[in-house]
Amino acid sequence: MAQDEASQDRPQDAPAPAQPTGDELALRRRVSDLERENVAELLRESAGEGRLSYAELEERLETVYGAKTYGELVEITTDLPNGLVAPRDQQRATPQYAGQSYVPQYNNETVPVINVFLSDSKKTGAWIVPQRQEVNAVLGDVTLDFTEAQMAHDVMYIEVKSILADVKIRVPQNAIVHLDSNPILGSVSEQEAGIGGVVDAPTTPPKTFHIRGTAILGDIKVKRGPRLSKRLRLH
């Protein structure tokens, strides 16, 4: 009897508590120091392009380093051409691995992707380089040679995931490389140009490469200068 009375006291049509959506959870996600630094670099580049004043840059950097959630980072960069976007605006999801930080997507741009599975892919010669490039290699080989490529941008961003694969990235001799590595039973390394042959003096200002590499039982190698055959003038 007491149980029946208690049941009568409860509202029969009371709505269940609203559950947060996936987008809301993504915006509430706590961010890492690396993600804060990536956004800080984006702000510095925007200030260098004249999009932000020095005072605005200082104010936003202070906010970035105090940010705790992804939604705060989105709000800080929402008015910039390459700013972060909310999850509902993302065109595609980024694969996640255990222990890997979330890689933010950028608006106003479709990032070209090289997907390799049990095969090879090479970009050499005078190929046209996008500002952002994503490489996903599984049980294969990928070569990106920028030494003769046509690069319209001064700064390039390359996201590489190597799973049981070998990825080689060859940059110009005078390139500025920022390498962010995440090897998991794999190797991510930067090497100088090999011995032998002639390396011509650079005739153009240095390009900057931001390379983020995740190697799971794979290898990612960043090398400088032309291939040995070029240095030896073999072709």
Image: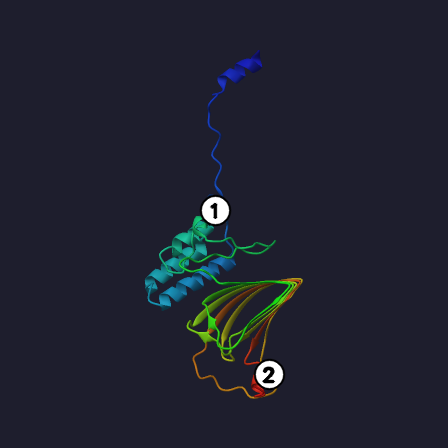
Q: Give neighbour class at mark 1: few <14, some 14-19, many 20+ (Cα, 10 Å).
A: some
Quadrant hosting residue 84: bottom left
Q: Is residue 69 above or below residue 9?
A: below
Badge 2 amino acid: Leu
The C terminus lies in quadrant: bottom right
Q: Position of residue 136 (x, y in %)?
A: 57, 62
Element under disc 2: helix
Could you tell which of marks 2 and 1 lies nearer the N-terminus?
1
Residue at horizontal 45 percent and vertical 75 percent from the top: 150
Total residue callouts = 2
Q: Position of residue 64 (x, y in %)?
A: 43, 56
- Point out the residue furthest to the top here: 1
Residue at horizontal 35 percent and vertical 56 percent from the top: 79
Q: Give neighbour class at mark 2: few <14, some 14-19, many 20+ (Cα, 10 Å).
A: some
Q: Position of residue 222 (x, y in %)?
A: 57, 73
In this view, the mark in front (2 or 1): 2
Left-right relation of 138 to 9: right
Residue at horizontal 51 percent and vertical 57 percent from the top: 103
Q: Position of residue 116 (x, y in %)?
A: 59, 63
Separation of marks 2 and 1 at Cα, in angstroms: 50 Å
Q: Nearer the viewer, residue 34 or 86?
A: 86
The N terminus lies in quadrant: top right
Mark 2 lies on residue: 228
Mark 1 lies on residue: 28
Please say which color scheme the image uses: rainbow
Residue 102 is tagged as none
Badge 1 amino acid: Arg
Element under disc 1: helix
Residues marked 2 and 1 touching at CB (< 8 Å): no
